[in-house]
Amino acid sequence: MPELPEVETIVRQLRDVVQGKSIKAVKILDKKVVDVRIAALPPSTIQRITRRGKYLLFHLDNNNVLLTHLRMSGHFQYGKEPSRYTAAVFHFQDGTLLTFNEIRRFGRMKAVKEKQLPKILSPLGPEPLECSYTVFKQRLEKKTKSNLKTTLMDQRVLAGLGNIYAQETLYRAGINPQRTVGTLQEGERKKLYHSIQSILRRAIRQGGTTIENYTSLEGAGRFQRFLAVYEKEQCPKKHSVQKMKIGGRGTYWCQKCQK
Ligand SMILES: [Zn+2]
């Protein structure tokens, strides 16, 4: 599932190719994935493309926003003809087209008003790359009895981390994913904060992680080469990696490196 670095990569690429373009028509092929009202919107121009957590937002010049969540396998393609997985086709005035494709049909795109956005996005926690250590600490303080890894993936605590980056940041910080939030010492919490920052930044530079079907407009990401524990048999120090379920999600960790 695309997490913050993957969505950020897609947002940056979309800005390069469709920001500023005028939408002539939208053809909706999968009504479960794409809100049918989008096809009925008056012609408009994509003013800005932004990200909030794992959401991708197309801000139109008529105060509408196309709020998009890729979920498992949603992806965009620019300048390619629709496929059997295409949920919507955006035709631009200049004759180019953008398709939103979703193989598993969990992704969503809906039309909302710009003024509704603050309320819709209000349950989300802060952006991990914009949040100070003090804010990070305050967010965790509300969850002292909860499992640490599950808390990192909780979008109300921090917006953007999912199963892969929660595991990788815990490995980098040397912390056992089974621990509860309240057991963290100040030094461990700082190390975790800095691990989140450095891993997310590096993953963005590498265009995200491609494990199964994540693809940006330019193809696969490259961060999978840098994964330490996720789906690994050995950690970078050649210890054997353990696998268990935490909160129902497969979790990889190293007994020797993570305490
Ligand atoms: Zn290890």
Image: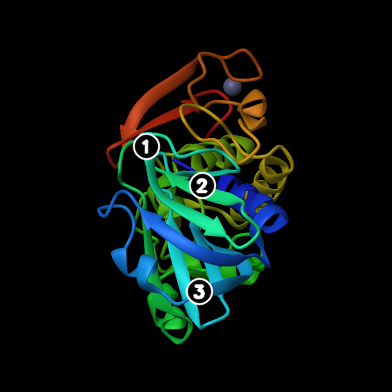
Q: What element does badge 3 sit on?
A: loop
Residue 219 location, x and y as percent?
A: 62, 32
Q: What element does badge 2 sit on?
A: loop
- Which image quadrant for residue 58? bottom right
Circle 1 sits on which residue?
A: 85
Q: Quadrant of the N terminus?
A: top left
Within-10-Å neighbours for mark 2: few <14, some 14–19, many 20+: many
As drawn, the label of residue 3 is 2
Give 235 or 101, whichever is nearer the viewer.
Answer: 101
Label 2 near label 3: C-beta < 8 Å? no
Residue 215 location, x and y as percent?
A: 55, 35
Question: Is residue 15 visible from the viewing direction of this image?
Answer: yes
Give 169 or 220, whichever is nearer the viewer.
Answer: 220
Q: Considering only vertical position in the picture, is 103 above or below 150?
A: above
- Residue type of the residue flagged with mark 2: Glu
Query: Upstream in the sequence, badge 1 or badge 2?
Result: 2
At horizontal 59% and vertical 72% (from top left) the residue drawn is 45
As drawn, the label of residue 131 is none
At horizontal 51% and vertical 47% (from top left) the residue drawn is 3
- Residue type of the residue flagged with mark 1: Tyr
Residue 253 location, x and y as percent?
A: 48, 28
Q: Nearer the viewer, mark 3 or mark 1?
A: 3
Circle 3 sits on which residue?
A: 43
Q: Considering only vertical position in the picture, is 99 above or below 164?
A: below
